[in-house]
Image (cartoon, rainbow, N blue to C red):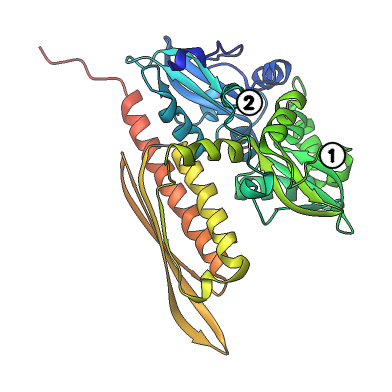
Amino acid sequence: MSIKDLVEEPKVVVGYSERIREIVSKMREYNQWVVPVVKDRELVGILSYNDLLRKRVSPESKVINLMSPVISINDNSDVTQVVAKFYTTKARGIPVVDDKKRLVGMITRERLLSYFLDQGEFKNVKVMEVMNSPVITINAEDSVARARWLMSNNNVTKLPILDEKKLVGIISARDIVDRLYSSGGKKKASILTEEERLMAMPVKEIMSYPVITVSGKENVESAVKTLLSRKISGMPVVEGDLITGMFSGIDAISIVAKKFELEMPIEAKLTSELKQGDTKALIDGILERYLSRLERLTDILNFKVTFKEEAKSADKKVYQVTAKVVTKVGEFVTKESDWDPVTAVRKAVEKLEERVEKELKKIEQVRRKPKKAEES
């Protein structure tokens, strides 16, 4: 199948100098999660709800101050390559370009899900087999600032909200972003006051309810139909009053990825103790989420993490984590230590991401620098 059948024309395409406030308004109007940024038809970056959540700027700022590096698919790619790109980046939408990097269109996660739904790829698989677990949740009285922090640091866009362990609502990145950037035309001091008020507000004040949920015993085919018909990216998996996981479109795409024998380029060497219980699941979750963040910055050739017991004191061990990523722009290595192995790996991969971003900014600055006129 040609991927041209999957390509759609994006309703929102922006340039370097457009204002964030106006773009967020259009994203909300057209329900577009990822916006291509172009210059003279060439794709030069993307702007997504994740960018808007993580890198807070003034609503009057220009796109160039917030956009992420290019993530794209060539129009000559096949379906397997498209699935691989969505599987590793966990993107909601990916621009399609020609050989000259000119924007051709977009492929959305929803369009890809619809295609594989029609192909019958999601039959005979239960939601519990592919869902994400354990679940990252937030309490109803916790602040919007905490919700924003949890989403940014865990690379998720939805958080189930609990009150005395009972599911009472859900909050998304879009719920926060739409409110953060709705203060157009106000003075800077007024904008800051409004942001402080929003960040201090309990999440129950802006959560969505009742919550759309799914049973772990339900077929993925039925669950995907719910995602598409309700225009949502994911939903909690519940058994009675207990949340057992989160199911998203990426979990459905993972079924196809496994059929194509695609694998995450992650190699994690854990100590025997860390392979037990929930610790391994937490570490695996962090590594997969940060791989998707790195994949959105540049092509990842290899991502390797090793654990070593560095010291022991008062029956507590210190874990040293070495994280190494090989990319098309270079090789990066970081080391971090902590009593908690999950904290140690998070700190190591966060630093890794910072170093990759720093290198890409240097490359972009060189690219933008005007060439000196050749001496006659």
Badge 1: residue crowd in 10 Å (few <14, some 14–19, many ≥20): some
State the image coordinates of residue 21 (x, y, percent, origin top left): 68, 21
Label number found at residue 33: 2
Q: Amino acid at mark 1?
A: Val
Q: Residue at x 45, y 27 (%)?
A: 82
Residue 70 sits in which quadrant?
Answer: top left
Q: Is residue 201 above or below residue 80?
A: below
| Left or right: 92, with 203 as reference point | left
Q: Residue at x 52, y 69 (%)?
A: 275
Q: Residue at x 32, y 26 (%)?
A: 367
Q: Residue at x 36, y 30 (%)?
A: 365
Q: Which residue is at the front of the view, 121 or 107?
A: 121
Mark 1, secondary structure of its residue:
loop
Most distant residue in the front direction: 124
Residue 201 appears anywhere in the view: no
Q: Is residue 339 above or below residue 248?
A: below
Residue 322 sits in which quadrant?
Answer: bottom left
Q: Quadrant of the C terminus?
A: top left
Label number found at residue 360: none
State the image coordinates of residue 308 (x, y, percent, origin top left): 42, 73
Mark 2, secondary structure of its residue:
loop
Q: Quadrant of the N terminus?
A: top left
Q: Which residue is at the front of the view, 180 or 6?
A: 6
Judged by depth in the image, the label closer to the viewer, 1 or 2, is: 1
Q: Amino acid at mark 2?
A: Trp
State the image coordinates of residue 14 (x, y, percent, origin top left): 55, 15
Label number found at residue 211: 1
